[in-house]
Image (cartoon, coloured by chain):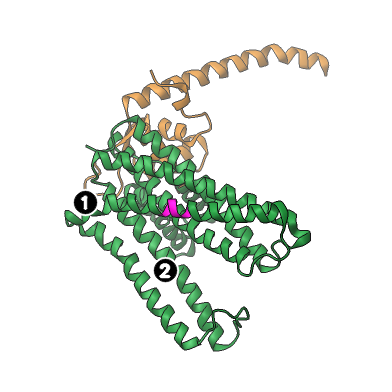
Chain colours: A orange, B green
Amino acid sequence: MPRVADDPKWTDPGLLVMGSLAEGPKHGYAVLQDVEQTTGVRLGPGTLYGAIARLEARGLIEALDGGESRRRPYRLTSRGAEVLGQQLATMARFAGLGRRRLARLAPVLRGAS
Amino acid sequence: MKLTTRLQQVLVAAYPPSFRHRYGEEMLCLVADGGHRWRDVLDLALGVGRAWVAPVFAGAPLHQRRLRLQATTVTVLGVWCASLLAAAVFSKAVNDPPLPGLHGVASGALDVGGVVLVVTAAIVLATGFCFWLALIVPAWRARRREVVVPALGPALFVAAWLGVTGLVALFARHDVRSANVSLHGPRGALIVAVLLGWVAVTVACVAGCAISAARALRRAQVRVTRLAASTVVAGVAAVGVGAQAVAGVVCLAQLGRAGGGLQGRDTVFGTAAVAVLVIGTGVAVVSVTRGLKAVRSGPVSS
């Protein structure tokens, strides 16, 4: 069971990278483009490879053999998939809770206005 | 080639060696693929800072621990050398000429602090040198040129420095007992050039020692890596004691300002030296903490 302290934070670029790699192995530039298209967040090269290095050091992603190419693809490890799944489940629970609370608050706000 | 691309290539080259070795090629590809914005340049600059301050090591756990220990060793050696240089600068600021009019507690603290500083510097130098020898000698016996060559560099530089200094002393005909040394004119330019050369030699020596030690650690035996852990702790403790002693002395000396204290240029040099000692000690303590954590988490030699 991964420790919570090791988990990437919501706003951590690492979570965005892991989310992108959940689709399948990608090299850095492909991750960058995918994150920008799906979330609108443009990761800089320093942020992207800082996140890749931290994830790789924690064993959440791993590099694949890129063959002749200078671009090395990365993929999620099984531990990385587990951590990502837990994070997304937490986010989903929080999002659901937030929506329910907002729904209860909306009539109160309408009455106040 | 665009300026932003060129700058990013320079910044990629500025990453720590282990990071550059692992991700440098890919990052250059990424830059070539379309990172032409100034925002990317800033992002890379921040990334370089983060990579140096909080380095991340990829690869197998054994490899990660070994890289961590290498980084700690290089950092501590650098701090040792910088601290010794700072101690010399501080000593020059407070003792040449001696602070006028100091008396009582401030004067006593200055004397005690000076002795503590000298003893600390000697301990630091001795532990650092022993550690360095423990790494270099086996490499020398094994004829590992990649370790021995950078280690020889500092020795050659020091020899060249002593030779040049002697020639300058002859040429300048400088009376070392004279307190009035003019830095104007060709003679002054020569003295300044020699001083800058001294700094360059120091940097080169630090780099040579650090590179050779880091390379030696790649294939060091377990006992050597344990030695590394214990000596860096001893060294840092010594640097810490020295830095605190110096800082205390400066404070007390400044308290005695009514009767003397540091003045003018000496204040700048003395304060800068103390800052180097204190900051260097902090950097070394953080690095050693990380290194010891790596050593405790598992073996660093196969």
Q: Can residue B57 be seen in this view?
A: no
Percent x, y for residue B48? Answer: 47, 51
Secondary structure found at label 2: helix
Dividing the picture into quadrants, the one containing residue B151 is bottom left
Q: Main secondary structure of the magenta part?
A: helix
Q: Which amino acid does label 2 sit on?
A: Val
Percent x, y for residue A64? Answer: 26, 38
Any mark on residue B201, and which? 2
Secondary structure found at label 1: helix
Asked whether the beta carbons under mark 2 and mark 1 sit within 8 Å of each other, the answer is no
At 45% from the left and 48% from the top, the residue drawn is B52
Percent x, y for residue B220? Answer: 24, 45
Query: Badge 2 sits on which subunit?
Result: B
At 23% from the left and 54% from the top, the residue drawn is B137
Q: Which amino acid does label 1 sit on?
A: Pro
Q: How many labels does the image show?
A: 2
Q: Can residue B111 be seen in this view?
A: yes
Dividing the picture into quadrants, the one containing residue B95 is bottom right
Extent of the magenta region: B121-125
Q: Which residue lies furthest to the left in this view?
A: B142
**Label 1, on which residue?**
B138
**In the image, is residue B124 part of the stretch drawn in magenta?**
yes
